[in-house]
Image (cartoon, rainbow, N blue to C red):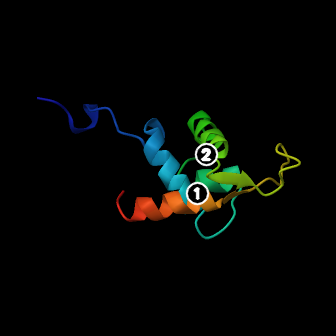
Amino acid sequence: MTKAGSQPELRPESQPGLLDDRVLLLLESKTLSKSEISLGLGQKGISGQLNKVIRGLLDEKHVEYTIPEKPNSRLQEYRLTKKGMIRLVKLKRGG
């Protein structure tokens, strides 16, 4: 017999594909900073996994910097690219 809480919890951060999609959904209607994305995901702070996911989305050209000439700016935010919007449409259609 197992306790209800003894199963390892399936956390969204541990599923990169899901986290990618959730970040894209958050960026659908507005630009957000990394800390705002983290809050939107229900995280207490910016996780290493979130940093990895955002880097991947940037590399894949699904999101872009709002201040490309200063990627490390404290005012940096992220927005969907056209490619990211297409991926989001496919995601919403279930594909």
Query: Which structural element holds mark 2?
Result: helix
- Determine the image quadrant of residue 26: bottom right
Q: Is residue 41 visible?
A: no
Q: Hey, which residue is sitting farthest right in the picture?
A: 69
Q: Hey, which residue is sitting farthest left in the picture?
A: 1
- The kind of residue on which mark 2 rests is Leu
Q: Is residue 9 visible?
A: yes
Q: Is residue 55 above or below residue 40?
A: above
**Residue at image x 88%, y 49%?**
69
**Residue at image x 85%, y 47%?**
73
Question: Which badge, 2 or 1, comes first in the chain's sequence?
Answer: 2
Nearer to us in this view, 60 or 24: 60
Residue position marked by numbered label 1 in the rendering? 84
Crowd tier of the residue under label 1, counting other residues whose Cα lies within 10 Å: few below 14, some 14–19, many 20 or above: many
The image quadrant where one finds the C terminus is: bottom left
Nearer to us in this view, 24 or 33: 24
Rendered location of residue 68, percent (x, y): 83, 51
Residue position marked by numbered label 2 in the rendering? 57
Residues at discs 2 and 1 in contact (Cβ within 8 Å): yes
Q: Is residue 58 above or below residue 92?
A: above
- Determine the image quadrant of residue 33: bottom right
The mark found on residue 49 in the picture is: none
Horizontal side of 85 relative to 70 (left or right) equals: left
